[in-house]
Amino acid sequence: MHKLVLASNNAGKVKEFQALLAPLNFEVIPQGVLGIPAAEEPHHTFVENALAKARHASSASGLPALADDSGICAHALDGRPGVHSARYAGEPANDLANNRKLISELNNQSDRSAHYVCALVLVNSADDPNPMIVESSWYGVIVDEAKGTNGFGYDPHFFLPELNLTAAELDPAQKNSISHRGQALRELMSQLQTRV
Ligand SMILES: O=c1nc[nH]c2c1ncn2[C@H]1C[C@H](O)[C@@H](COP(=O)(O)OP(=O)(O)OP(=O)(O)O)O1
Ligand SMILES: [Mg+2]
């Protein structure tokens, strides 16, 4: 069993990672369980923020750490909210307020296309010179009306035309099978296999 600190305090992400990693023989310890506070996320790219989170959790725990920095990029808004997705409507992070702000900014926009981004970074130690880094995207459309109660964050407004459902209407296993996070984690695991 591989022990791994998950460098996230987002309950929705933690659930998804636990489901994705449980069958792969990983013991996932959310950093909150160890009393590790959230890291600063000052950077302009998902990858840099994920690296900062992974180093922070590994340094505090002495264990390998996996971090996720993710967000939604609306194409009509030049990619906003992007890396600012979690606190788009200000502190403290609030999914409902973030969604309202995004919908109001898209009010007069005909282009509703968007994508989620997930950057994952896995470090063996805080000073690991060779972190594993992957990034994946998931494309959809932002709709005004919230639908569904699964998932978290922007999921009730993230509509998948090919399925005719929002991400919050998918069951958790279905979401993990196609999401930015599921794709990125499968890629990370396949890279990890070539290393050991
Ligand atoms: O699958 C997703 N379904 C819905 N919303 C999502 C998803 N993936 C990311 N998102 C949104 C949530 C949050 O507004 C932001 C992540 O921000 P991000 O800084 O990476 O996470 P966070 O601050 O919530 O927790 P933490 O940094 O402790 O991992 O993007
Ligand atoms: Mg964050």
Image (cartoon, rainbow, N blue to C red):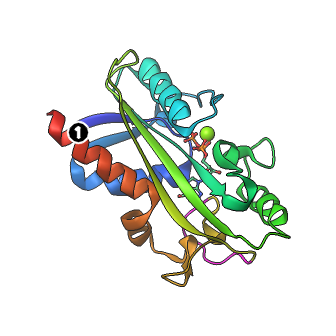
Q: Is residue 94 left or right of residue 28?
A: right
Q: Is residue 192 above or below residue 16?
A: above
Q: Which residues are magenta?
A: 145-152
Q: Nearer the viewer, residue 65 or 45?
A: 45
Which residue is rendered at x = 50% and y = 23% of the image?
56
- The image position of residue 103, as x and y in percent, is 79, 66
- The image position of residue 184, as x and y in percent, is 38, 50
Q: Name the chief secondary structure element in magenta.
A: loop
Q: Is residue 134 above or below residue 146?
A: above
Which residue is rendered at x = 24% and y = 42% of the image?
191
Q: Which residue is mark 1?
A: 192
Give the class, few, some or many, for how many residues have Cα within 10 Å of label 1's Cα (few <14, many ≥20).
few
- The image position of residue 164, as x and y in percent, is 54, 84
Q: Nearer the viewer, residue 101 or 21?
A: 101
Which residue is rendered at x = 40% and y = 72% of the image?
174
Q: Amino acid at mark 1?
A: Leu
